[in-house]
Structure formats: C-alpha cells, structure tokens
Image (cartoon, grey):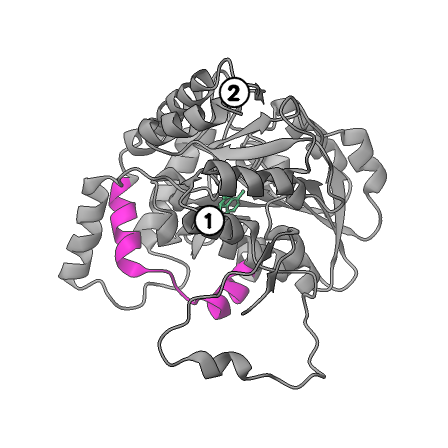
Amino acid sequence: MIVNHNLYGFKSTEKLPLPFNCEHYIHMKYPESFSSKLPKVQTSIFTVMSKMAADYNAINLSQGFPDFPVSTELIGKVNEYMTKGFNQYAPAAGLPRLREGIAAQTKLCYGAEYNPETEITITAGATEAIFCAITAMIREDDEVIMFTPAYDCYAPTVELCNGEPVYVPLHAPDYKVDWDEVKKLITRRTRMIIINTPHNPTGTVFTAKDAEQLERITKDNDIVIVSDEVYAHIIFDDEQHQSMSRFPHLASRSFVVGSFGKTFHVTGWKVGFCLAPENLTAELRKIHQYVTFAVNHPVQCAIADYIESPDNYLHIAEMYRQKRDFFVDALKGSKFKVTLSKGSYYQLLDYSAITDEPDTQFAERLTKEHGVASIPISVFYNNPVHECMLRFCFAKENETLEKAAEILHKL
Ligand code: PMP
Ligand code: GLN
C-alpha cells in the first residue's frame, strides 16, 4: 500500500495501478543524502482532483479542459500535414508562417506590432513560455511579485532560480488589485511582476485603470512583466482584454504569453507562444532551445492555417458566455452564491450558506459523496485563506453542466 500525501491536505491510500511485473521498481531508492530543490512541491491540484473525479466516477468540473469536440477542420489539417510529411523538427523559434499569423492576430486584436522573426516564439504550451521567461530573467535573491490566488507554475519556477516570490493576496468577492499595496512591496530587489488576465481561478479581468497603475509602478525602474494571457479570447459582457501588448511602455518590458490549447479547445496539444521585445526574446530563446528546442511541427502547420480566419477565435467568447450563463442559470435557487466570471472558463461559487468547512475538505466531500469535482482555491495562496470558494470549469457540454447543477441544487 502506498500512502500518497500531497500539498493540498488530502491523503489518498488507494493502491496505485502498476504495470504488470513492475512492483520492484518502487523499492529502488536514491541515496538519502539527496535533497529536493523543490521540497514543498507535490502533485498538482489539477492532477489530484482529476484522479479523484475518475476514482469516484464524479462529473469533472475541476481541471480546466473542454469536454466537447475539436473542430474537424483543424483535426483534418493536422492529419493532412502529417500525411504530407511535416514530421521532422520545426524551426526552433517556431514555424515562420505561424509566427506571422500570431503577429496579424495581435495587430487585429490589440493594434500592436510584433516582428515575427525576432519578437515571437512558439513554445510547448504557455507553461514552457512562462518557465523560459522566468528562468531567463531571475537570478538569486531577485524578488518576483505575484498575485494570489496564483496559477500553480509561477512560484516553483521562481524558486528553482533561487528567486523569492512576493505574494499580494486578492480577496473575494471582486479580487481587485490594491496598487498602493503593490507599490509598498517594490524594493531594489524587485525584478519581475507576474500578472494573469483573464484570471485563473477567479475569472476577474484587468481594466485599463489596472494597466495604467502598472505603468506608473514600472515607469522609473527596469522591472519586467510576465503577462499570462492564455484566456485572452475568453472575455465576457462589456469587458475588453487588456493585453500588455496594447500599451507601448508595458509592452517594451513584457513577455506576453498565449496558449492555443485554450483558444482552440486542444489543451492536450500543448502549443503556446510568447511575444516580447527583441532583446528579451533572445534571452527566452536561449532557454527554449534547451528545454524543447522546437514544438510539434504538423500541429503548428495546422494552427497556422486555422488562425488565418479570425472567426475561428473571435467567436469563442460568445460561445463561452452562453456556457457561463447556462451554468449560472441552472444554479438559480441553489444555496451557492455567484459573482459572475468576467473572463476565462471558470466560475467561482461561494458555498458559505451550505457549510463552513475548509474548501479542500468540501471539494473532497463534494467529489466523493456527491459526484461533482471542483478546485479548492485556497491552495493557490501562500497563506491559505478561508473564503468558502470553489472553482468550477464550465468548458463542458450543456448536458454535463446541467447534471452537475442538478446535484449542486440538492446541497
Ligand atoms: N496559465 C494559466 C492561467 C492557465 O490556466 C494555464 C492552464 N492551462 C496555463 C498557463 C498553461 O497553459 P498550457 O496548457 O498552454 O501550458
Ligand atoms: N490550466 C488548467 C486549470 O487551471 C490545468 C492545467 C494543468 O493541469 N496543469 O485547470
């Protein structure tokens, strides 16, 4: 029996499935003198909750991925390019045609000009772009400001570089940034600020005023920005995506990160990109070249064709708005309280009228006893808060959302 402890306070005693005749592998052990570079890091909450959902046959609204089909045109193109023989290494910086397509998309959406040759890099998902940007810039004792709840890959990457994460907590229900607080945290050691809009897990978005404040804070120093914009095309109602690329001063110091996984419902393909000024791009590419060297070639060819039609990405905001509204309407009359998500495909639900349990405990019980998996958001804080909030992914078929809402109504 393997007891599997994890960061999030769950203890799973399930026997892990092992391939036939492999039992002996788990008895191998490296010498005790070994010490982990990331002693606090354990299995990601997304893996933990998706496994729990599978083990208990629960509806999985935890890990963020769509359950509906991918465009047959896009799949057809991947097949076509594989068949035509685009199966060897792509250029390290990314397929030139795809980089040109991203430049055109950025110009169309935000009016910003990036040189595809020197300022755009294709990466293995947004995760690789974020890893390379942080690793390229952060040295020992550099401070990196990030807002919590924060997406899980930021802090460990900073720590790998011997940098120091500096956390700015955001609070329910609006999770607004207090820029005066941020200003107070700037020191001579501050090297980077990581932002994420639309925001995972809260579904909040930066306003033009937020961008203005960030501009003020970075006016007289050389702080760089990593702007995680993977949900750029999933923004609702009257909100506009405030990409850092829109603002010349901010763009001149930003790594702007995107993900085709989110935009084209293909999270498993792991293709993303990074926009940055030439000198920052050069440093990012030095790392990229040794992390992956190059990204999946036929998939890049297919996406290059597909983003030529803006309709293929501009319609997704409306599609997801309908899903958000469908899910929220289906919850009307339940005990969950809702502040509408403004962007991303996540909706937070406040369960304080049901129980005062910590969110990790309630999420576990909701999965095991009621059959709906979600994400407890306290795990994305450095000092976990007790705000009775769970994150639900609504990138699902309406039928899935309806079934989940039916269960949630009974609580
Ligand atoms: N940033 C945020 C905020 C995310 O939600 C995700 C999740 N997919 C990523 C980065 C990573 O994106 P990718 O799968 O393209 O690596
Ligand atoms: N971004 C996805 C989410 O927030 C998960 C990605 C992952 O599993 N690493 O749910």
- Is residue 369 rendered to the left or right of residue 54? right
Q: Nearer the viewer, mark 2 or mark 1?
A: 1
Quickly name the residue at label 2.
239
Whole-percent x, y for residue 396 in the image = 37, 34
Disc 1 within 8 angstroms of ligand 2 (CB): yes
Region in magenta: 284-306
Seen at 49% across and 23% down, the residue is 410
Q: Quadrant of the C terminus?
A: top right
- Is residue 112 rendered to the left or right of residue 43? left
Q: Is residue 111 visible?
A: no
Amino acid type, label 1: Ser
* Vertical order, 181 against 287 (above or below): above
SS assignment at label 1: helix
* Vertical order, 45 against 237 (above or below): below
Whole-percent x, y for residue 237 in the image = 47, 17
Residue nearest the observer in this picture, 281 or 365: 365
Whole-percent x, y for residue 278 in the image = 53, 53
Q: Main secondary structure of the magenta part?
A: helix
Residue 245: say if magenta. Answer: no
* Vertical order, 343 against 260 (above or below): above
Q: Is residue 117 visible?
A: yes
Quickly name the residue at label 1.
50
Q: Residues within 10 Å of mark 1 (few under 14, many from 20)?
A: many
Residue nearest the observer in this picture, 371 or 262: 371
- Residue found farthest to the bottom: 31
Seen at 32% across and 31% down, the residue is 397
- Is residue 152 rendered to the left or right of residue 357? left
Amino acid type, label 2: Glu
